[in-house]
Amino acid sequence: MDHTVLTRTALIEHWLGHRRLTRRTVEAFPEEDLYAHHAPGMRSFAEMVAELTTWTIPTIRGAIDRTWRWPAGTRRPAATKSALLEAFDEDTAELARLLESVPEARFAELDEPVPGRREAVIASLLYALDNEIHHRAQGFVYLRELGVDPPEFDQR
Amino acid sequence: MDHTVLTRTALIEHWLGHRRLTRRTVEAFPEEDLYAHHAPGMRSFAEMVAELTTWTIPTIRGAIDRTWRWPAGTRRPAATKSALLEAFDEDTAELARLLESVPEARFAELDEPVPGRREAVIASLLYALDNEIHHRAQGFVYLRELGVDPPEFDQR
């Protein structure tokens, strides 16, 4: 008999804490560097944030109704820091709302969000969250390289 | 009524997938750069891996029995890449073993792993996992800066 370790309420609370930290990371960037600075062969932090706001909601929608409708590619980031933050906030609000609508039985159900990747729906959702943690951490490196202190990792 | 989204078995499988990816990230580093390369004001990837192998197991032990016994500080990384990988593998095996021993009722229980941080035990465990994702992502930036392709994020 398997055991519950995470509930829906705790998942939403946990994810929203990460969203707040990601938002503070965007805020910490000087506007120009948000779009211009990048490591060799990597994207700017603005482009990484646009990745999050392109792919997270379609993941949750697929979790809800089994229709995996993926955009053709990552959208271009909004052109200013304030517009990027606004788009991010809208995405966060939709994320919280949609996570309430995933049927409980779906989380453990095997599905195939992209051809060849067969996994439980919770794994697809955690993939989207982990991707946020991953790219935000790269934003932390960029900030250090720019001489800016990143936000505290343990504050959510 | 709250809903289950993640079970113990799925958590362990998910974490071990991340451990495999972190291990491949260590392997991708040229040995000297593993210890020498770092962004300004940041640590080497070897030191970040030593952070993981210092703090993760004490977190799970505290989850099991409410005794939060923290080391005085992060241990120094093993002096060679192969020794670092060996220590990491031992840590991973213990992690998997200990996660089986956390009493089910503990995951949702409020506790105080460090003074002033009151949270559910699952939040403390996810903190340790998220910290691994966070630092590994910084290792990805280091690899790009060194001209080395990091492993695929979606392979676990």
Image: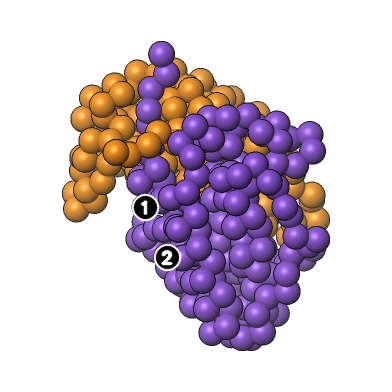
Chain colours: A purple, B orange
As shown in the figure, which amino acid type bears the numbered disc 1? Glu
Q: At x 75% / y 60%, what residue is drawn?
A: A71
Residue tagged 1: A13
As shown in the figure, which amino acid type bears the numbered disc 2? Arg
Query: Could you say where residue A113 lies in the image, as x and y percent from the top left?
Result: 70, 41
Q: Which mark is residue A64?
A: none
Q: Chain of mark 2?
A: A
Residue A108 can be seen, yes or no: yes
Callout in the foreground (1, 2): 1
Q: At x 79% / y 49%, what residue is drawn?
A: B149
Residue B74 can be seen, yes or no: no
Query: Could you say where residue B132 lies in the image, as x and y percent from the top left?
Result: 51, 43
Q: Which mark is residue A20?
A: 2
Pointers 1 and 2 in contact (C-beta within 8 Å): no
- A56 lies above or below A121: below
Task: Count the numbered circles shown.
Answer: 2
Q: Quadrant of the C terminus of chain A?
A: bottom left
**Mark 2 Cα shell of 10 Å, populated few (<14), some (14-19), many (≥20):** some
Q: Chain of mark 1?
A: A
Q: Earlier in the sequence, mark 1 or mark 2?
A: 1
Whether labels 1 and 2 share one chain: yes
Q: Quadrant of the N terminus of chain A?
A: top left
Query: Helix, strand or loop at disc 1?
Result: helix
Q: At x 52% / y 35%, what residue is drawn?
A: A107
Query: Helix, strand or loop at disc 2?
Result: helix
Q: Is residue B99 left or right of residue A123?
A: left
Q: At x 57% / y 83%, what residue is drawn?
A: A83
State the residue in front, A30 or A123. A123
Tell me the distance, in whole angstroms, between the alpha carbons under discs 1 and 2: 11 Å
Query: Could you say where residue A129 lies in the image, as x and y percent from the top left?
Result: 54, 50
